[in-house]
Structures are given as structure tokens and as C-alpha cells.
Amino acid sequence: MTGVAGGDLPGDWSYSIGLWHTLRSPEVAVFGVPAQTGMRILNVLGDAIREGNPLEPDQRRDDVLNGFPVAIRPVHPSWYRSFFGAALDYYQRPPLPITQMFWPDKQGRFPWEEDVEETCRATQPLLWIRREDSSGPWADEDPKRNWPFVTMLPYHEVRAAASVADGSQPVMRAEHSDSGLWTFEGVPSAEGREELVTTILGHLVGHHPDLKEVAWLAPGQSVLRQADGAWPAGG
């Protein structure tokens, strides 16, 4: 599961990576709940799928949220690169099926239904509609404008040494794992490698602008900063 902090957008979002690979089930995304909560919800849904309760088009399900139904709708591919970069990184290229799981308001109404609560509506974009035919902050947002990490958004979570994450120490090593996870390490100490923390890639690039020079790393590659302080050229 991957969780994404929404930044200036109306909410966070989370999505699965691997359901299509292991079960030939569409991947699933949920918007409008905190990223950690979203990942827990998707784990519940993933377990139900593994137990033989597959996703169906335009489905209503009662096996995910206690006391409330959820709705499943397909995601139009025009949204993939905006919100699901890590999934594209994992699978290397579309197409792959992605669905969106919608949660209702306290009265059981979904975002497209009349009189739905505003928070429920505003924090859950209707991704079955083509991006070109949509409006509002979700459609207007272009998180990849002048952004060098092709399959990662500024709001994606990465792992970094604590002193690297807060900007107090430089990045000395960058790694892009086979699974698509990025890790950034600092200056090693006598005690060994510093503990890693979770941070947001955009925040990290804000502290360390030259990380744009390692965006070329493919999955399975890593790179060390050179003695002169520069990053090796690549791409």
C-alpha cells in the first residue's frame, strides 16, 4: 500500500500496489481520509478480495467499513500519472486496471448523490470521469510541473535519514529499490547508518534541491555522492 499526503489538495489518498500482479484484481484507491487510515482500509478490502470476494464494476460492498457501505468505480487512465505514480513505477507502464473506493457521508450518501455532505464530496474526486472533462482542485493540480521524478509525485512518501529529512545533513546516498521505494541516507557515523524516517519527497527536495540530479535512477539502482560534492551524471 502507498499513502500520499495531499498537500494543498482537499485530502490525502492511498492506493494498493500488487493486487493486479498477485490476484489479477484491479488496484484500489481511496481518497479523502488520512493516508495511514486509507492504507488500513485498503488492507481490509485486499483481505476480502483474497478470500474470494472480488471487485465488480459499479459495486456496493458492506465488508470494508463497519456499518457503512462503500462503492467501487473504475478510474479513467487520464488520472493515472497524476495520482498513482508508484503503481506505474512498479508495473513500468500502463494500462493496468485501477478502481476507486468511495466512502459515504454519515447518512450513507456518496459524493455524486444529492445533498451529500460537503466534506465527503470535496475530498473524493470522481475519477471515472476523464480528467479533461473535470474541474476543480483535483483536475487543476499539476504536481509534476517542472518535476524531475517521472513516476513519483512531490506528495509521495519516501524514506530518509532523520538528519537528512530535517535538512541538517546532506544526502550522501540515494537508492531506488526494485519495488519503487526511494531511500536517502546521510553521512555515516561510527555507530553505523542513521535511523530512517518517513518523509515527503517534495519536502526533501525543498531541503536538498540537488536531489533532482538523481531522479534518473531506475528501480534497482543506487548512487553515492562524489568526493567533490557532485552527483554522478546519469539517465
Image (cartoon, rainbow, N blue to C red):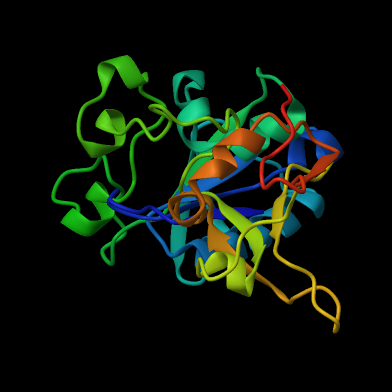
Examine the rendered structure and indicate whether residue 138 appears above or below residue 67. above
Q: Residue at x 69, y 32 (%)?
A: 89
Q: How many marks?
A: 0
Please indicate whether residue 223 sits to the left or right of residue 199 in the image. Answer: right
Q: Position of residue 99 (x, y in %)?
A: 55, 35
Which of the 4 image quarters holds residue 186? bottom right
**Taking 202 as reference, is 86 above or below it?**
above
Residue 75 seen in this snapshot = no
- Estimate the x, y position of residue 213 in percent, counting from the top left: 61, 34
Nearer to us in this view, 86 or 199: 199
Foreground pick, 46 / 61: 46
Quarter of the image where the N terminus is located? bottom right
For the C terminus, the image quarter is: top right
Residue 12 location in percent, x, y?
41, 55
Judge by depth and name the residue closer to the eye, 6 or 145: 145
In the image, 232: left or right of 100? right
Can residue 187 be seen in this snapshot? Answer: yes
Task: Between residue 27 and residue 136, name the one nearer to us.
Answer: 136
Among all residues in the image, which is located at the extreme front?
A: 228
Q: Vertically, is 75 above or below 8? A: above
The residue sitting at 70% across, 20% down in the picture is: 93
Residue 47 rendering spot, x and y as whole percentages: 74, 58
Q: Is residue 126 left or right of residue 114?
A: right
Q: Which residue shows up at 13% across the image and 50% down it?
A: 115
